[in-house]
Amino acid sequence: MDFFMGIKGKDFVMVCSDTAAVHSIITIKQDEDKIVPVDSHKVFCVAGEAGDRVQFSDYVIANVKLYALRNATELSTKSVANYARGELANALRRSPYHCNLLVAGYDKGVGASLYWLDYLATLHKVNTGGTGYGSYFTLSLFDKLWHPDLTEAEALDMMEKGIAEVRRRLVVAPARFIVKVVDANGIRTVAELKE
């Protein structure tokens, strides 16, 4: 029942996630932040089984930080996405992680980038992405509204339209969403949207 979406703009990436922690038909809590910072300019949006989601993201983030300490350099967003993909692929035949990710980041000289990664270790660089039942409604809307010179205000408007569509059409729509931006200045929370 997890749901997240992301939009790559001209010089930023905006990501949005629901904040509900659920197990089957039971809501455990409504304030879980599923947008996890990897470093100062990269985030994971993680959806899936709670244990897998936390364990996998913590494992990848710890190894990315270890690499940065050992080599005195930070990995690019593309490198983090490919590393996460490799770890999912290695675990696939042993003990798979049931989690899907959006990897969003900003790199000097490269700019903003957004990668979609699923539990089968499929990796794609995308302009708009999402997962969960809500993405069935938002991705078509994002395809229609997205353009290369998208501003932050336009992206936030797209997110709000996407959330409105999810609330209108999805029976089990989450009650709360959190929206964050990654750009040259780092990671910041833009909005918390409630019913």
Image (cartoon, rainbow, N blue to C red):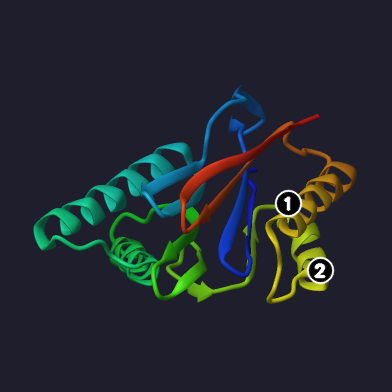
Q: Position of residue 172 (x, y in %)?
A: 77, 38
Quarter assignment of residue 168: top right
| Horizontal arrangement in the rendering, residue 151 relative to residue 170 (left or right) | left
For the N terminus, which image quadrant? top right
The earlier-in-sequence mark between 2 and 1 is 2
Q: Position of residue 109 (x, y in %)?
A: 40, 75
Q: What SS does tag 1 mark?
A: helix
Q: Residue at x 74, y 75 (%)?
A: 147
Q: Residue at x 57, y 66 (%)?
A: 11
Q: Nearer the viewer, residue 78 or 151?
A: 151
**Amino acid at pointer 1:** Leu
For the C terminus, which image quadrant? top right
Q: Nearer the viewer, residue 125 or 188?
A: 188
Q: Position of residue 51 (x, y in %)?
A: 40, 38
Q: How many marks?
A: 2
Q: Residue at x 49, y 60 (%)?
A: 104
In the rendering, which numbered label is found on residue 156? 1
Q: Which residue is mark 2?
A: 145
| Horizontal arrangement in the rendering, residue 69 relative to residue 43 (left or right) | left
Q: CA distance from mark 2 to mark 1?
A: 12 Å
Q: What SS does tag 2 mark?
A: helix
